[in-house]
Amino acid sequence: MKQLNDNKTQKEGFVSIRGARQHNLKNVSLDIPRDALVVFTGVSGSGKSSLAFGTLYAEAQRRYLESVSPYARRLFHQMPIPEVDQIEGLPPAVALQQQRGSGTTRSSVGSVTTLSNLLRMLYSRAGNYPPNQSILYAESFSTNTPEGACPQCHGLGRVYEVTEKSMVLDDSLSIREGAIAAWPKAWQGQNFRNILITIGYNVDIPWKDLPKKERDWILFTNEKPQVPVYPGLDRDQVQLAIKQKKAPSYMGTFTGAQKYVLHTFANTQSALMKKRVSEYMLSSDCPTCNGKRLRPESLSVTFAGYDIADISRLPLKRLLTIFEPYSDGSAPSLIKLTKNHQEKALVAQRIAEDLVARVTVLLELGLGYLSLERSTPTLSPGEHQRLRLATQVRSNLFGVVYVLDEPSAGLHPADTEALLKSLDRLKASGNSLFVVEHELDVIRHADWIVDVGPDAGEGGGEILYSGPPAGLKNSARSKTKDHLYNNLPFEKSAVRKPSGWLELNGVTRNNLINLDVSFPLGVLTSVTGVSGSGKSSLVSQVLVELMSAKLGKAPSTEEEEQDVLQQDVVATLGGKITKGAERLKRMVVVNQKPIGRTPRSNLATYTGLFDIVRKLFAATKLAKARHYNAGRFSFNVGKGRCANCDGEGFVMIELLFLPSVYAPCPVCSGARYNAETLEVTYNDKNIAEVLQMTVNEAASFFEKEDRVSRPLKVLQEVGLGYLRLGQPATELSGGEAQRIKLATELQRLSRGNTLYVLDEPTTGLHPTDVEKLQLQLARLVDAGNTVIVVEHDMQVVAGSDWVIDIGPGAGDEGGKVITEGTPAQVAKNKESKTAVYLMRTLS
Ligand code: ADP
Ligand code: ADP
Ligand code: ZN
Ligand code: ZN
């Protein structure tokens, strides 16, 4: 490619970028083709996203918003403008990023793809109504509308009851011994108990010996008596104290236990509290709708023999076989319908055609095992992105640029081929595709490669290559080239021997049915299989839950963030650990769930190193003179933070008709602290400046402070040296969050006998970074631990000691152990879809 040196000429059919300096980009200029698949490559932190999202997408969005309304334009002056001199030839952009720290939503596969809307239309206009029932509007088939929701459960599908049985778990205990399990813990619980003593109840006999009338009042009363409280006194002493007119410690107000549970459940802001009280509620399928969440009238309408709730529970590939005959006109019932109700038949056929076309795209993307009802919080970020991609493929937009973030995440190499087909389709209908990607098969498929590097952060930000794939070969400094052209042959050290086995029996969950499986101990195991085959069900769900139970702990505390109402009820559950659990003392689950859902948590707070940094600031001369303690240097609480933005660093601007946007706080300019706090410096840097440092910068800045530099070093080792200490958790990708958790664990220096469970740890990692990760995993195993990863990256699979391949297909076509053994053994298996790819890497 001839370099462009004239700033003013813009090549036909190209986007020209001049002087890009966003984040670590080093004033780069380049031209990239439109109507092509352009793949941005480079090690993690090299600047790919800063170019694709931070510069190109941000600028496209800014231009679009400026064009829509002068009102918005005024406000957008406060929005950060990408650091770039000039961009020409840029079409409007649509970004499909991995969900970053997505909050809890009520959306489902059906709503994200808008397929549910189509189905509702179909049932409304072309459904089979019972005699004498009038036609229903489409809204009547939605559980989120008053017209559609089941009147008893309000569309939840479940009803909740709070009874004596659910609140009093052991009726041989007295109230003092904790009979009323549903009461709040600690002070509040003692308060209720003391109030009952004042009122005159006996709190020292077994619950079951109290008269029913008393039990009912304590649990179910709506009264809220206010009485004097004398902590520590018994019934008689309290009566005496009242007689003697002794001053009580305070006046306490009583609340019935049932009221407490229901009120807390409905009103608490804390997911943890909500979860706690929900344990004292009995939930069951709603008797009116049988858990289908819709009104009886709506459920009485059928199509092809299914009501809308049943059809939404079928896997998408079944939907296709149901609707195909309607779409091509061959369905007998459609032919019959045409004779009597021609208009209804036409509607049915039109909608069926549309459904078939859209579902076909979803199947091509390897998502045929999903049902419309499946709630999006249970999907992996990769599945979610592919869902949105499929929706775009059918949107008939053209002339736009789609900016994608690692669309291959979560995909088995066999699924990646389907992904490429969809990308080709988007391109063929006249769109441009800018894709940030690490997967070599996607990179090879590119029309144009932009390789950013050579290293991360300050060490990156240069364009090493921009041109058709073949030319990358000649780029001297590209790390991508080495992997793409296989200059580094696979090397495997000796396979480790298991020190024992962890045996699971009768595992039943999602698509796994009565499965027996054994995991080797003391080695690195990869669990493989196409997307939807059941790897996560086996490893991240069943194994983790069974092991937690063995270790006597509730599974991962992160689950508590989920709204209990949104948790899917797991229909079938089964399985137990029959052997080997006693060999494990601890379990660590390193998943891709966000490390926090608010900008208030970040790398520094999560790893705990910020606590030490704050102490260092509190120990400075000026801080001591002003009596600032460590709390002063927190932006979350206290007197140190900026009062205007409450330490958020930005303020939200509400826009009419548009989503709200965030702008830097005008008072602290994003520093998060007030001016007095920022006057305190440690080695000439204030606390806000420290949060602005990258891990690499901080590691040398705190070199002499071992307690700070040690965790930083581990973060560098897992390839996160480029992250800023204060980078909000909401801006981290799932892969970055996972590596932060991994680093936090690694610095704990385990003593062995720990089980590490990781779900696709290579997400977001360039092959060069994958090598670093493998070293870390090997370190864990060599220290006497067991590591189990769910993985698609053949480099990691080939480097493990043991492979368990699940399949053969997805959903009900998967769920079986196809083969297991050393990588070399598995690669020879004829039935395994993984074998061919593994063989390629091994040979
Ligand atoms: P990649 O996409 O190649 O992994 P990024 O473009 O995300 O890399 O990051 C490149 C550099 O820019 C890194 O040093 C990173 O820490 C920095 N960076 C990324 N996002 C931000 C941000 N919002 N603010 C400041 N620096 C950032
Ligand atoms: P993999 O990890 O191999 O991609 P999963 O274990 O996620 O596969 O999925 C296996 C099957 O179980 C799929 O049919 C999927 O739709 C279903 N499944 C997984 N998780 C859930 C869930 N939380 N609720 C309902 N079905 C699920
Ligand atoms: Zn109901
Ligand atoms: Zn502020």
Image (cartoon, rainbow, N blue to C red):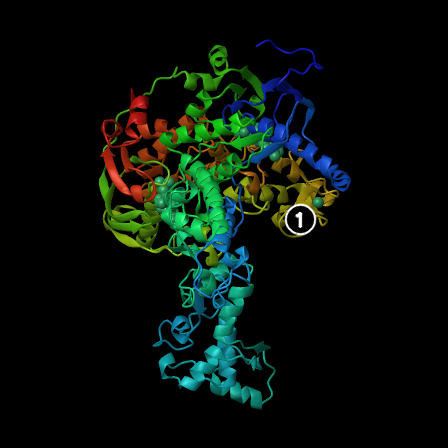
x, y percent for residue 791:
36, 34
x, y percent for residue 725:
57, 37
Tell me the SS state at disc 1.
Answer: loop
Residue drawn at point x = 57 percent, y = 81 percent: 225
The residue positioned farthest toward the bottom in the image shown: 243
x, y percent for residue 338:
44, 49
x, y percent for residue 740:
48, 38
Residue type, label 1: Tyr
Q: Is residue 490 above or below residue 279?
A: above
The residue to which callout 1 is attached is 628
Q: Is residue 510 above or below residue 177?
A: above
Residue drawn at point x = 46 percent, y = 38 percent: 357
Quarter location, residue 362 = top left
- Identify the image quadrant of the N terminus: top right
Q: Which of 359 and 795 lies nearest the eye of the viewer?
A: 359
Query: Is 839 positioned to the left or the right of 48 in the image?
Result: left
Q: Is residue 403 above or below residue 262?
A: above
